Amino acid sequence: MRAILASLGAFAAAGLRPRTPLAKAIVLVLLIKLIGVTAMRIYLTADHAVPAVDAAAMARAVGVAAPPPQP
């Protein structure tokens, strides 16, 4: 268990203090992606709107699968 925690600690330390330019660029890109995903999540769930399509309308649109033929 100690090895796993040490590995996770080293991973977190590498993310917090990247040593090489490539590692710094990777951390920057991951942070930009995280900010983008968070912004999309906030934008899409901010109004608390009820979906316009209910389960019955979706079942009509998709259609019910026909039962397999009986032998």
Image (cartoon, helix red, strand yellow):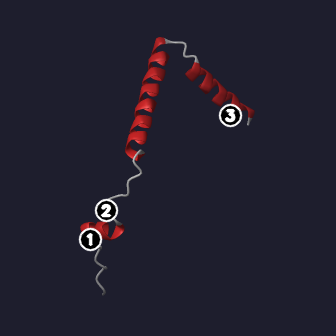
* Residue 18 point in image, percent of width and height: 54, 16
User: What residue is at 26 percent from the left and 71 percent from the top?
Assistant: 60
Q: Residue 4's mark?
A: 3
Q: Residue 53's mark?
A: 2
State which mark lies toward you, 2 or 3.
2
- Where does the N terminus fall, quadrant-wise? top right
Q: Nearer the viewer, residue 64 or 20?
A: 64
Q: Quadrant of residue 4?
A: top right
State which mark lies toward you, 1 or 2.
2
Judged from the image, the secondary structure of the residue bearing numbered disc 2 is loop
Q: Nearer the viewer, residue 51 or 5?
A: 51
**Labels 1 and 2: the sequence-earlier one:** 2
User: What residue is at 38 percent from the left and 53 percent from the top?
Assistant: 49
- Mark 2 surroundings: few (<14), some (14-19) or many (≥20) residues within 10 A: few
Judged from the image, the secondary structure of the residue bearing numbered disc 3 is helix
- Where does the C terminus fall, quadrant-wise? bottom left
Horizontally, residue 38 falls left or right of residue 2, namely left
Inspect the image, locate mark 2, and give the three-letter code of the amino acid beneath it. Val
- Mark 3 surroundings: few (<14), some (14-19) or many (≥20) residues within 10 A: few
- Mark 1 surroundings: few (<14), some (14-19) or many (≥20) residues within 10 A: few
**Labels 3 and 1: the sequence-earlier one:** 3
Considering only vertical position in the picture, is 11 above or below 49? above
Inspect the image, locate mark 1, and give the three-letter code of the amino acid beneath it. Arg
Q: Residue 3's mark?
A: none
Q: Which residue is mark 1?
A: 60
